Image (spheres, helix red, strand yellow):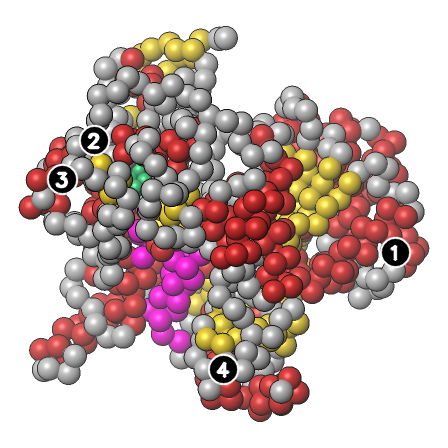
Amino acid sequence: MAEKRIVLQNCGFIDPEDISSYVENDGFAALAKARKMGPEAVIAEIKASKLKGRGGAGFPCGLKWEMARRASGDEKYLVCNADEGEVGAFKDRYIIQNDPFSLVEGIVIASFAIGAKKAYIYLRAEYHYLRDTLKAAVQQAAERGILQGLEIELKEGAGAYVCGEESALMNSIEGRRGEVRFKPPFPPVSGLFGQPTVINNVETLVNIPRIIWRGAAWFAGIGTKDSAGTKVFSVSGDVEKPGVYELPLGSKLNEVVRELAGANDIKLVQVGGATGSIVTESMLDTPLSYETLLGSGAIIVLNSTRDVIDYVYRTIAFLNEESCGKCTPCREGTEVLAEVLGRLTSGDGFPDDIKTLAELSQAMNISSLCGLGQAAPVPVLDSLKYFKHDYENRIKQSVFLRKVGFA
Amino acid sequence: MGKINVTIDEIKISVDAGTTILDTAKSVGVEIPTLCHHEQLKPSGNCRICTVEVDGSRTLVGSCHTPVAEGMVIHTRSAKVLESRQATLELLLAGHTGPCVLDMEARECALHNLAAEAEMGAPRFQVQNPRYYAVEDVSPYIQRNLSRCVLCLKCVRACEEIVGQNVVSAAYRGFGSKIVVDADIPLNKEICRDCGVCIEYCPTTALVWADGKKKKSGREERKIQANPPAGKEKRKKLLEMLQEKQRTAGFISETAMREIAGAAELSVSEVYGVATFYGFLSTRPQGRYTIRICKSLPCYLKGGLMIAESVEKELGVKAGETTADGKFSFELVNCIGACDQAPAMLINDRVYGNLSPEKIFELLQNCL
Ligand SMILES: Cc1cc2nc3c(=O)[nH]c(=O)nc-3n(C[C@H](O)[C@H](O)[C@H](O)COP(=O)(O)O)c2cc1C
Ligand code: SF4
Ligand code: FES
């Protein structure tokens, strides 16, 4: 299957600095249509389209909007999550760089649908260089009278991966430490400043004008039964052509990594960033969908020369550094995992290590407060499943080296 | 308010909507252990000791903060619950220093008692460098021994919610998290006097009276008298004020933090807590150019560490340091979202991709 550009349809065809080039390409036509339809009909349309969140969790978008619309509050907020901190993810950056207007249009439609007068774009600090593009896009839209009273404020992060998690993100916007909050209450009921809030990923929001313009039935017809539409993948690592590729959901991993990105030597692929699952070479015909694997769509390829334990160690070290530190299993657990894996990487393993990794992973997975701590053990558990030999050999080597006095 | 029907450890019960699982359990005589929870404080859900199993939920749920829902079937003593609680306790024990077993005072520690109840031996997990902090005995009233702290945030919440002060805050992040006063200095009597609320709420012996008095002072129950929290608009500006300072001054000095605290009507510790959480905020002076080399997987696979080495060689400083002339700071950072151009780095706000040692040399020459 080839690429299918829906989200990225304008990328390369419009001038991201100039709104008129967007307007000439039917820009804001969907917004005009949405305003005629009215909020309830817009929500019904998004529900019918079966659009699910593209930020990783995959929550049905229309349902989230409906909850927020029905919730009572003094004010309602829409938040665009442009924190994109997942290792190997850069698709939101690509979208903003090439087509910020579609994002603005999506934000205006979403705010209209849920009844928000104020929207935030939370942009990660690493993307400070996108600030001017985004600000100009919002400014130009305002000058053309497109916002109709909606205020869109750009909020910048300050270097914390966990602030991509929705509750940490809200704390950050409120000027607090980016610690996560327990749920419920869920943001559509009580979110930013305690008010009903919808948080959507950049890519989710860019899908909105497409759906409104061409209809829910058209959108639902793309992809699979439970995974409608396309997905934008960020592919990196041991590939010839790293970059952004958009395919219908349900496309096979093989098509993305081999046919499009040009990987020819594959040991394993991690799908979904640091907390993503591991796929081995023999499983490359797995379809990419919410039913199988997807996450944020970050795909990292490792070739046969790569050391699995070293890779898992680096991944856990990342999560350890980025844990917010609020809950015990994640704060202490990632520290212990990183230590065991660090020892294994440097050839200082012990027979109990595999058991420790597995048992701790299991506990963290079910008892951590947020997705970071819950999913941190995924690469550990997956590598133990597919590459247990590597661990066993490393431990044997370690024991041997210690015995002969080398370590 | 409607009634909600739930089943808890096979017992059927109907409670008011909004009741937490913990309180529901209590009402039928089912005890769920807790550590960070206190009836008089807002729930925080941080310790995860009180988690229980709910049918249909993949993960366990915190009973101290989750309200019951119609038809919920709850298990407080399933194998999953007990195993994960055991792991959590072991993690807490492994993460801090203190010879609990030999320590008579340890009996006043809720963690010690929870571990004893669970009949636990030595923890399975080991932390190479458990937290160690020197005992703070500068204050004539309160002695702090943070090596024993379990980061339950009760002191932070008690100080804010019960006495309307915000003397104590959490600072730093992840495993390095620490409860601080002011700009992370030993507790003294100028910062905090002798109300002792934090001592009463602290479940461990991290906070005790300096004169060796028992924890519970025998005073009547505290009345909640919190001032309204800092206005939303002011608080909201805090991160921006810190970012602005970082941009203009290159770092956030202690003086700057005090000024910002004054302007935002927050305590210094709150400002310090936020400033030390975020990676792009710095409390030490930074060079005119901050070089951030990505060390995450996609860049690592493409030789990111080699790039870091050539920067080290060129500048003569290691990651985390600033050159003597104050020109360059050099850091290794996590994924900067330029993986399609790996190996990549940021110099101040600009991305440079597809790096090679030669290119580094050229770029740095241009900056020099
Ligand atoms: C640790 C962690 C990091 C996350 N980072 C991001 C992120 O960078 N961008 C994003 O859109 N969602 C991220 N999410 C998911 C958000 O919490 C949230 O589900 C999402 O923004 C909702 O938008 P959607 O429904 O449109 O996907 C993260 C979740 C976790 C647990
Ligand atoms: S000092 Fe005591 S009350 Fe405060 S966080 Fe540590 S253990 Fe909890
Ligand atoms: S007592 Fe519930 S999470 Fe700590």
| Secondary element at image label 2 | loop
The amino acid at mark 4 is Ala
State how far apart marks 3 and 4 are (Cα): 48 Å
* Residue ID at (68%, 24%): A74
What amino acid type should be assigned to the residue bearing mark 3? Ala
Look at the image and say whether residue B306 sits in the magenta stretch.
no
- The correct choice, above or below, for A14 with respect to B271 in the image is below
Q: Amino acid at mark 2?
A: Lys
State which quarter of the image contains the C terminus of chain A.
bottom left
Judged from the image, the secondary structure of the residue bearing numbered disc 4 is loop
In terms of image quadrants, where is residue A20?
bottom right
Instruction: Give the mark count.
Output: 4
The residue where tag 3 is placed is B106
Q: CA distance from mark 2 to mark 1?
A: 66 Å
Please tell me whether mark 3 sits on a helix, a strand or a loop: helix
Mark 3, Cα crowd under 10 Å, few <14 / some 14-19 / many 20+, is some
Q: Is residue B229 left or right of residue A328?
A: right
Residue position for label 2: B215
Mark 4 sits on what residue? Answer: B324
**Label 2 Cα crowd, 10 Å radius (few <14 / some 14-19 / many 20+):** some
Q: Which residue is mark 1?
A: A19
Residue B161 seen = yes
- The answer to whether mark 2 and mark 4 are in CB contact below 8 A is no
The magenta span reads A306-335
Q: Is residue B248 above or below residue B200?
A: below
Residue A225 is situated, as x and y percent measured from the top left of the image, at: 61, 42
- Mark 1 Cβ inside 8 Å of ligand 1: no
- Dot 1 surroundings within 10 Å: few (below 14), some, or many (20 or more)? many
